[in-house]
Image (cartoon, rainbow, N blue to C red):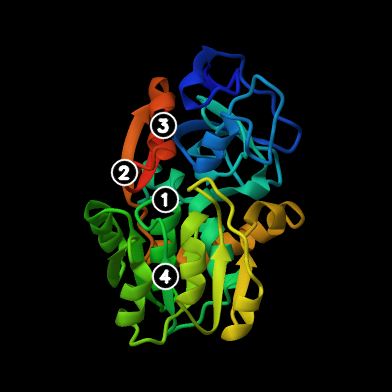
Amino acid sequence: MRAVQITTLDGPSAVEVVDLPEPEPGPGDLVVDVDHAGVTFPEVLQSRGLYQVKPPLPFVPGAEVSGVVRTAPGGSGFTPGQRVCGFPGLGGFAETVVVNPVMAFPIPDGLAFDKAAALPMNYLTMHFGLARRGQLREGETVLVHGAAGGIGTASIQLAKAMGAHVVAVTSTPEKGEVARAAGADDVVLADGFKDAVKELTGGRGVDVVVDPVGGDRFTDSLRCLAREGRLLVVGFTEGSIPEVKVNRLLLNNVSVVGVGWGAFFLADLPYLQEQWRDVLPMLEAGKLDPPIGSVHPLEQAAEALREIDERRAQGKVLLKVR
């Protein structure tokens, strides 16, 4: 099978497309023929050895896929020929992957494979972030940084589906249009976002901040929070990890909340299926519709990773495998 391999830790440009034997499934695994694979920031980090998951070299990256079940063990709840998306964690940048059935999800007949591949990482991460960690309630206001990227657009759509008002923060007006198309009620530029948010909210601030960016925005994000607001720490695409002066948390009784979806579900795998049961009705009702930014053939995996690394992504970045 064709697959993308990380053979050295020299960054996105060093990934290689190679021919490999198909993976051997364990006794309880699904074998899935991959149609699309989602490209995420963790894969960029893995290409430099900077992600917390550090497989031995060489390895095939790729955390999320969509495709068709080739084989399924009895009692798994899946059948050959079934359309699914899944979260293999590794191995998804390949024509065939094995997936634990607990980490696979049947998709509606009308859902295209590209849209399905955009769901597992971003939408389940932010469902965990907004619903469980952020305790988002109907009628609250959510501020979303990096709002044109995969995590950002997923946050916008999930927050809207949960009855929130969404303010998107983007670095350019063009990315602002992506956020607005995803459903954002208001869009502000990153430069001066704190003052813009205060004006939009009449000085009250927002109830929840979704921050996959980190870096210099962090303190101003805290200042944007309303009374008992929650800042969700999702990631650090800017590169630097901010520090909290905890006295700031006292001023308005605000909280800084970690969103470690992987760490959570790995200790409770059935939680993933609980999430899918919550997300599926939103998907079937048309409230979730992942914006697709760019689709690259497998041979252009390096360019797909560079697009995310250089923060050029507008919507979900995908690999078309078949």
Question: Which residue does the numbered mark 4 point to in the structure image?
Answer: 143
Q: Marks 3 and 2, how far apart in space? A: 14 Å
Above or below 96: residue 275 = below
Instruction: Please state which of the two labelled residues, at mark 2 or mark 4, is closer to the viewer.
Output: 4
Instruction: Please state which of the two labelled residues, at mark 1 or mark 4, is closer to the viewer.
Output: 4
Q: Badges 1 and 2: C-beta atoms under 8 Å apart?
A: yes
Q: Marks 1 and 2, how far apart in space? A: 9 Å
Is disc 3 placed on a helix, strand or loop? helix
Going from N to C along the chain, the mark reached first, 3 or 1, is: 1
Question: Which residue does the numbered mark 1 point to in the structure image?
Answer: 150
Q: What label does residue 306 carry, if any?
A: 3
**Residue drawn at (71%, 47%) of the image:** 75
Q: What label does residue 293 carry, if any?
A: 2
Q: Residues within 10 Å of mark 4 (few under 14, many from 20)?
A: many
Q: Marks 3 and 4, how far apart in space? A: 27 Å
Q: What label does residue 299 carry, if any?
A: none
